[in-house]
Amino acid sequence: MSLAGWDNIGILKREILLYTQLIGKGFQVSFITYGNSDDLKYSNRLSGIKVLCNKWGLPKYIYNKYLHIIHRKHLKSCNIIKTNQMFGADIALKSAKYYKKPLINRMGYMWSDFTKRENGDFQEIISYEENIFQNSDKIVVTTQEMYQNVVRRAKQLKNKISIIPNYVNTELFKPSDNFTKEFDILYIGRITHQKNIQGLLEALKNINLKVLIIGNGDMKNGLIEQYGDLDGKIVWQNNIPHNRLPGIMNKCLLYIIPSFYEGHPKTLIEAMAAGMPVIGTDVPGIREIIENRKNGMLCGTEAKNIKSTIEKLLTNQILCKKLGQNANKYAIQHFSLEKILDMELNLYNSLLENSQMVRL
């Protein structure tokens, strides 16, 4: 992913926040991206993060193949190399081996698992992942379920693995009573098969509710053509800047994530931090966050289950209030930036005992 790509889908500020905090702790941070010279314009917005990119416009395969040489000055002088997802981790591994640097491989989701669910052709990715696992100094996953998945495949890697969830900026995402509720239901995310938006739309057919759906994806145009706005119930909106999400969340009664499977969904924990009662499907990545009827509601992926859960929650204001309050407490306790920053620092210190300056 390029910085421009992050910016285009409105998540640049969210993705860099942890690293700007690390700079505040005395660390030096560099981003090596796959973007072109457009990424250089973000240098002034990244609070001290050095941006290195394909400023020469080299063909992608050439840039990827020789990245460890092209950016040798920074790679040679850094203390740790970290990759943010499994896709592209082979390039980070090549650089780490070449310069004999420790490698942290972080995964927000299991690439092979997602591929298996989508098209079934995943054996090549399994082999790719296992090579990265074996040669990483540390493996970071975001959920206990992912941890168990990796351990089942390679028990000897158990001591390499750390569970560090995604973080939420609880100063930005917090409850507020200063907004009039304009929508009953909010969904934010990609409009793809994985997200089961069709199931949500089917559930909403015979419910008189106002729904805001924010996001883009390969199924969006088809779903709009098929369902339209369901007689004025649905408002479709494109991706928006991340810093506008708290205000939108505070204008909606509840948040829903109807996916078939997830990694560790960031918008879900942001909605919880904002004090929204949340509904999520009882699937990997969601059921580890939502404890049914305690900090949210779990339901099946079928339209009838989604519909009945929405109706149960919206007709019980006492439950709505309790779940929203508990969701906020849970998000602060488990996913606050401060908590995750401490976990990251412990990870780096486990690799570099007394290092004062680390360039990632």
Image: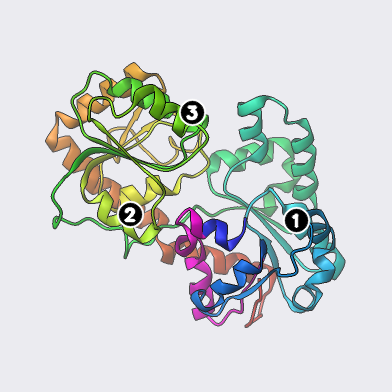
Check the picture and name the quadrant holding the N terminus: bottom right
Q: Secondary structure at mark 3?
A: loop
Asked if residue 348 lies left or right of residue 269, the reply is: right
Spatial CA span between label 1 and label 3: 30 Å
Check the picture and name the quadrant holding the C terminus: bottom right
Residue 309 rendering spot, x and y as whole percentages: 27, 25
Q: Secondary structure at mark 2?
A: helix
133 drawn magenta: no
Tell whether label 3 touches label 1 (CB within 8 Å): no
**Residue type, mark 1 in image:** Ser
Q: Which residues are magenta?
A: 7-32
Spatial CA span between label 3 and label 2: 24 Å
- The residue to which callout 2 is attached is 245
- The residue to which callout 3 is attached is 260
Binning the other alpha carbons within 10 Å of mark 1 as few (below 14), some (14 to 19) or many (20 upward) gives: many
- The residue to which callout 1 is attached is 136
| First in sequence: mark 1 vs mark 2 | 1
